[in-house]
Amino acid sequence: MKAKIDNANATALQRMLDSQPVWVDVKAAHEVIPAMDKYQIFHAGPPVSWEEMCQPMQGAIVAALKYEGLATSTDEAFALASSGKIKFSPCHEARAVGPMTGIISYSMPVLVVENKTFGNLAFSTINEGAGDVLRFGAYSDNAVHRLIWMEKVLAPALKAAVNKMEGLSLKVIMAQALQMGDELHMRNQASSALFIKTMAKPLAEVVDDNKKLQEIMAFLTQNNDQFFLNFAMAAQKATADAAHGIEYSTLVTTIARNGVNVGIRVSGLGDQWFTAPAPPVDGLYFTGFSAADANPDIGDSAIMETCGLGGLAMAAAPAVVRFLGAGTYRDALKYTNDMYEITVGENPHFAMPNLDFRGTPMGIDIRKVIETSITPVINTAIVSSKAGVGMIGAGVARAPLSMFEQALLAFVEKLNL
Amino acid sequence: MKNIIDKANQEGYHRIDSAQVSLVDIKYARDVLPGFSDYVIGHAGPPVAWSDMCGPMRGAVVGAIKYEGWAENDQEAEALVEAGRIKFVSNHSVGAVGPMTGIITQSMPLFEVLNETYGNYAYCTFNEGLGKVMRFGANSQEVIDRLKWIETSLAPALKEALQLSGPINLKVIIAQALAMGDEMHQRNIAASLLFARAIMKYLAQVSLRDVERARIVDFIISNEQFFLNLAMAAAKATMDPVHGIPNCTLVTAMSRNGTSFGIRVSGLGDTWFEAPPELPQGLYFPGFSAADANLDMGDSAIVECMGIGGFAMGSAPAVVRFLGVSSAHDAVKYTRDMGEITVGRSSYYVMPTLDFQGVPMGIDIRKVVETGIQPVINTGIAHKEAGVGQVGAGIVKAPMDCFVKALLAMDKVLE
């Protein structure tokens, strides 16, 4: 049986390694999510009802309902959201991912990423930048207007540019950025700059209206160091999905949090979620905030760690360690070295100069997590537990061990059947 | 005596550390470099006569003469030089620097960098990109055409964009790029991107035809060494105020003309202390070997004087493979060694891979001679024949003789 599992894991790992995620298009959510209607909203993490949701997620849903024109005021939006008319489901179940609250509604433009090796698609929203943004639960007019601008101005320009380029390999940008001090989750300085470098000329060519071009360049270049995160997330989702559904495989293909619970899915265990209460985040807070203000861990962005980046690649990004309050350079190396203990392979495409060009740890095995009691480390932003306040810090969270225990039990049970 | 020198060196260190350098404008050489008019050519390194110039520098001189229209073709250009009509000037003597051959003539646009702390300006040419370029001694029509385009299209657009953006703080970009794996001499990938990001919004506002805007944007973003020339101007603007402190034994310039390697020392006036340059040790592009290499060349070693480049190798593990160094561990060792010959650590330029230690800066000629450790310089390698271009990249050490000569001279002038 062990050989069977090892074989299955080797297959799953190879599929992750062979994946070639390419950004191919920008489309409205309803164009890519089958049978989506206006009253359907997708969110980060495992399933959660309106009543159970944390405040930031509720706030983001209010913003989405206003953006869709389904409510004209905040009160109306709250009433509609709690009326039972809106159907909520996890992004992950629609091949999509979203950072923090991860809200995706009908009209929102999404990045379309194709895994060229296996043909599967993945989707992610477009990053809104910093400030009062929907992903942190803001529902101000400013947040809603920005979403409309992204739909009407930014998305068509990105679409035209990427169509003209006939696709953009995300793996190449991610590999380069990893050599430039990004771990691609909480530090996307290099990847965002590489993205701008790649897109500046095509954008200048496809946008005829000079005022629009100025707005787009300002949006991409000012105060938007995390712009690439959403591309990386879609790339990782397209990679993880290709490794999902391998019989007997014990590799983790999803880690996601909804702000109340965190859940994992396992390649050989179908679409079942194994959940635990979302852990608090250990980190540094912006001036005026403390752990008492923090929401528990939230967002689909742990897809970065699921496929070996983010916290797993901390050694590549010593500068992020200070931002996260996670110690020294040595600690950064230790995080990554520990993660080799719970993974089945390494990704030679993602070489880390600081570890003498060793590949990132890849393929989290639930068996190894249980054996070693070492849990995956997740780099993350910290959001206020109140809707609309936004980001208040950044830090490190650990995926709770109990999810892996439940998954392993389910696996054993399945084998016995 | 030791106390007097240490005190002078502390003042020198403080001036390096407290410099605030920003790109403020684009200017043409004729408007800002003293004496730059017809028939004047600036070059890298200490002063050198035409008869002593290496192949690539001669090639670049011929190219510059054609670019300025002082001659129609190569033969005419060479005849003009042979007739003694051209006046050669060391860039460093006019507040300017240029990479490799470092050629500057009156029509060339220059980055103008202001050291806001001390009020001095420094200048550097624009980076031409890779391939056949004048800094490596190429002088074909393609090279001249590119320089003309830089002069007449790129420079005015960047100037206008800079007027919209206001000064761009280079110290911040250098500090950020250090945390992104650049050492700012042979690796400027992050710094070039950060600069492009800083200017892009304003370039979009400059009134240009779409096709020209796309060409300008493409030129800036497709050149991973674009920022090198900005780093050089920043380093020159940082180091110039350190020069001329009585009794100070810090190195304020290291520079090479391809024939000779020279250093200048703060307390020793404008004298260059020279020695033959060494051959860089490094990796060659396919088809080339050490036999094709020119001796070490260029003003770019000004960045090492400020503590980046070879001195910051520990922060740029990805560059080591490009330069033929074996491991990340060796990269750290270079930086540690440079700590032995410098007087302090930068408070701004910190290296995450060395637990946020500052880069070693302020090369003390006494320490170099005492320890026998030579400053290390990361460098491009030019072909020894004019026009072939870059053949590799590697590491070179500043010749010990420069430092010994300077120390002997110091003995005589100590007050």
Image: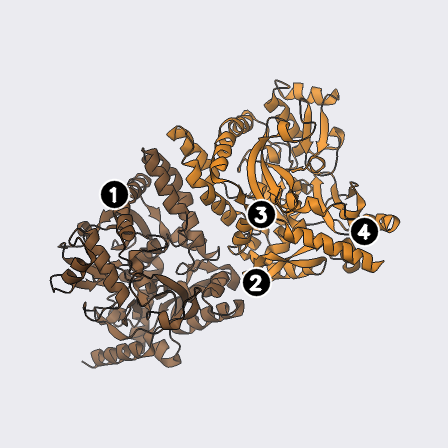
Q: CA distance from mark 4 to mark 3?
A: 33 Å
Residue topped by disc 2: B356
Residue topped by disc 4: B247
Q: Earlier in the sequence, mark 2 or mark 4?
A: 4
Q: CA distance from mark 2 to mark 3?
A: 21 Å
Residue topped by disc 1: A152
Q: Earlier in the sequence, mark 2 or mark 3?
A: 3
Q: How is the image coloured?
A: by chain
Q: Residue at x 45, y 66 (%)?
A: A324
Q: Element type at marker 1?
A: helix
Q: Is residue B390 above or below residue A342?
A: above
Q: Is residue A183 above or below residue B237?
A: below
Q: Element type at marker 2?
A: loop
Q: From the image, state whether disc 2 or disc 3 is nearer to you.
A: 2
Q: From the image, state whether disc 4 or disc 3 is nearer to you.
A: 4
Q: Colour of chain B?
A: orange
Would residue B279 be seen by someone viewing this image from the given angle? no
Closest to the observer, B153 or B5 = B5
B209 left or right of B135?
A: left
Q: CA distance from mark 1 to mark 4?
A: 65 Å
Q: Which chain is brown?
A: A
Q: From the image, state whether disc 3 or disc 1 is nearer to you.
A: 1
Instruction: Please say if the residues under marks 2 and 4 sit with CB atoms less than 8 Å apart.
Output: no
Q: From the image, state whether disc 2 or disc 4 is nearer to you.
A: 4
Kind of residue at badge 3: Gln
Kind of residue at badge 2: Phe
Q: CA distance from mark 3 to mark 1?
A: 42 Å
Q: Residue at x 59, y 44 (%)?
A: B392
| Image location of residue B162, percent across then percent down | 50, 37
| Image location of residue A281, percent across then percent down | 38, 71
B354 left or right of A411?
A: right
